[in-house]
Structure formats: structure tokens, C-alpha cells
Image (spheres, rainbow, N blue to C red):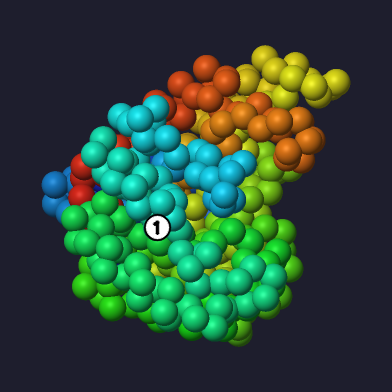
């Protein structure tokens, strides 16, 4: 039998006697899962490069800092600052079309935030959601056509914290379908928190109107987050749905148990660990760290008031990752979804 491995260079293996799979030249016998180095039962007969078009999709396509979208101030569009983030931030998200155009002028694509267009938080779907969409549809279409907008951020913790139902979300997303059918790169992303939203999924599966899902839980380290995605999040997805990772990226000057330097060292290590995960996991479509700008003490949960922008080593780590992701995008793997 033959088995094809999910890796950037596809190895086709012909197996004698028993089936086995190869990963980075290590052969794993399917019957025992014991690893051998390619000398027993199997031999490599072909190695195909990316040029042949036979690569996996394990390329993260997006780096975007999580944006606080409170409107009006104090936090309208915190996190997306095109003038300061050009050259490494690949993707912003906002409901401010002026900011979207500013991003496009320096090479940053955007996801249009549509949560407050469609939903009355704490209540449900707005009665006038169609009219509100119609009011912006022409401008949005122009931004999609010129590729300033490449998708839609549906909302943050809609089901877990804002009393929006999956039926509300499915109904609203129908208005985006004509654009998505015309532009195969467009996708919808929703972030949730906690686990209560999982029990409300229709038939135990994420509705297919959401293309990308993420969860923010800053109490988990990279390994714990990945384990939770594998055990709990991935089983509710279809093969065409993908995930964003939302890592914590913050520090504190008032934490009595940890210095700001210790936070900075930890967050640098976490950044690289999350990107290593993204590079090795086909399901990961992007990374959206939280947060960029500083908050006042008490404005967020304890010991998270210092933003990435005030931690030079952490900012440099994410900038390096962003430039790497920007190179990934040049392969063309991000031109369509999924």
C-alpha cells in the first residue's frame, strides 16, 4: 500500500508486507506504531517538492494583534496601528474602513469586524440587521474587490458571553455568502471563550458559516493550549474549517510574584512555541496575540496591563514571526480558503 505524508515535501512510500507512514524520513509502522528509520519494510520511491504543487497547507497565513473594539473610546481599535506595524503585521481587523484603507496603503490586509452590525450584544440578532448591512455593503464590496478586506471577524465571545445564538450567527452570515462565493479567499472568523459555547453547538459541530474559530484562555501555556485544541476543539470542526491561535502577550509591573523581565522572557518563549505549533499543524490558519497597547491597572484582569508594545524583546519576536508569515503568503497558499 502507499501512504502520503502531510509535509512540505511529500514523500510517497511503497510498503512491503505491512502499511506504514513516513514523517520527516521516520517510518511509523501502522500495526505497532514503532518507529524505524526507513530500513525495514518500506522504501522511499519519490520526493516531490513544493514546485510540484504537492504540499500540505500547514502554513500560517495571518498574524494580527487582537484588537479592542469598544466604541467609542477608551479602546476603539486598540491593537491595529498600521503606521507602527507595517512590514510585519499581515492582517488587521476593525470596523473602521478608514483604518482599513490606511492598512492597505502599507500592505496590511484586514478583516472587517461585523459583530456590531448584526448583533445587539446581550439581546440577539438586530431586527434591522439587513438594513445595517445594506448601508455598508457597497463600500465593503469595493474593499473586497481591491483586496483590502480579505475576510470578516464575526465577533468575540458571542455565544459564551453576549447571548448570541448559533441560529443568530447563521442567519446573519447568509448576507456574506454572495461575496464569499465570488471571492474564494474570503473567510469568517469567530473567537469564543471558556467551554459553555461548545454545549450549544448544533449537532455538536461548528456551523459551516464560520470558517475559522479560536479560543482565548491565557491561563494555558502553549502545550496546554495545543492539547485542548486537539482534544476538544478539533473534533467539532469539519475538514474545511481551521483555527486561529490567540496567545497571551502581556506583562505586569505590579505582579508581586514575577518581574516584568520575567514576563518578557516567558512571552518571547511562548511566541516561538506558538509559531512552531502553527508551522507543524495544518489546521492553524493564523495567530492573533493579545494584546499590543498598554492598559491601566484594573482595566483588564490582574497582571496583564503591560502590552507587547512596551516589551521590546516580545515585540521583536512577533515582528520576526510576522515577517516569516509574510513570506509564507508569497507561496500562494493563502490566496484561497481553505
Q: Give neighbour class at mark 1: few <14, some 14-19, many 20+ (Cα, 10 Å).
A: many
The answer to which of 26 and 77 lies nearer the viewer is 77
Image quarter of residue 57: bottom left
Q: Residue at x 31, y 41 (%)?
A: 103
The answer to which of 250 and 40 lies nearer the viewer is 250
Indicate the quadrant containing the N terminus: top left, top right, bottom left or bottom right. Answer: bottom left
Instruction: Give the left or right position of residue 40, taking residue 67 as reference.
Output: left
Percent across and percent down for residue 292 are 54, 33
Front-most of residues 26 and 253:
253
Kind of element beneath mark 1: strand
The C terminus lies in quadrant:
bottom left
Q: From what the image shows, is residue 7 above or below residue 18?
A: above
Residue 245, image x and y in percent? 53, 48
Residue at 22 percent across and 62 percent down: it is 142
The x and y percentages for residue 218 are: 69, 43
Answer yes or no: is residue 98 visible.
yes
Task: Read off the residue under disc 1.
Answer: 112
Q: Quadrant of residue 186?
A: bottom left
Q: Looking at the image, can residue 323 be seen? A: no
Amino acid at each position: 500500500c502507499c501512504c502520503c505524508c502531510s509535509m512540505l515535501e511529500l514523500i510517497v512510500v511503497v510498503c512491503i508486507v505491512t502499511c506504514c507512514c513516513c514523517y520527516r524520513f521516520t517510518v511509523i509502522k501502522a500495526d505497532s506504531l514503532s518507529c524505524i528509520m526507513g530500513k525495514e519494510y518500506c522504501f522511499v520511491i519519490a520526493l516531490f517538492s513544493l514546485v510540484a504543487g504537492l504540499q500540505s497547507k500547514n502554513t500560517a497565513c495571518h498574524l494580527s494583534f487582537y484588537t479592542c473594539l469598544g466604541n467609542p473610546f477608551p479602546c476603539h481599535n486598540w491593537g491595529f496601528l498600521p503606521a507602527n506595524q507595517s512590514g510585519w503585521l499581515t492582517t488587521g481587523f476593525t470596523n473602521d474602513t478608514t483604518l482599513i484603507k490606511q492598512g492597505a496603503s502599507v500592505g496590511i490586509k484586514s478583516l472587517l469586524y461585523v459583530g456590531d452590525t448584526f448583533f445587539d450584544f446581550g439581546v440577539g440578532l438586530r431586527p434591522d440587521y439587513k438594513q445595517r448591512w445594506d448601508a455598508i455593503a457597497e463600500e465593503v464590496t469595493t474593499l473586497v474587490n481591491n483586496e483590502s478586506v480579505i475576510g470578516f471577524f464575526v465577533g468575540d465571545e458571542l455565544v459564551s458571553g453576549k447571548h448570541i445564538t448559533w441560529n443568530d450567527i447563521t442567519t446573519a452570515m447568509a448576507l456574506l455568502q454572495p461575496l464569499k462565493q465570488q471571492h474564494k479567499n474570503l473567510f469568517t472568523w469567530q473567537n469564543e471563550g471558556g467551554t459553555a459555547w461548545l454545549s450549544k453547538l448544533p449537532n455538536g459541530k461548528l456551523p459551516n458559516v464560520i470558517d475559522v474559530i479560536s479560543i482565548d484562555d491565557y491561563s494555558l501555556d502553549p502545550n496546554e493550549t495545543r492539547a485542548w485544541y486537539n482534544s476538544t476543539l478539533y473534533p467539532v470542526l469539519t475538514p474545511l474549517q481551521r483555527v486561529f491561535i490567540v496567545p497571551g502577550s502581556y506583562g505586569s509591573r505590579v505582579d508581586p510574584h514575577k518581574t516584568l523581565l520575567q514576563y518578557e522572557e516567558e512571552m518571547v518563549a511562548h511566541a516561538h512555541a506558538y509559531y512552531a505549533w502553527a508551522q507543524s499543524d495544518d489546521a492553524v490558519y493564523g495567530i492573533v496575540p493579545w494584546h499590543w497597547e498598554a492598559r491601566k491597572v484594573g482595566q483588564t484582569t490582574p497582571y496583564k496591563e503591560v502590552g507587547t508594545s512596551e516589551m521590546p524583546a516580545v515585540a521583536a519576536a512577533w515582528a520576526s514571526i510576522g515577517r516569516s508569515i509574510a513570506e509564507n503568503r508569497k507561496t500562494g497558499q493563502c490566496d484561497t480558503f481553505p
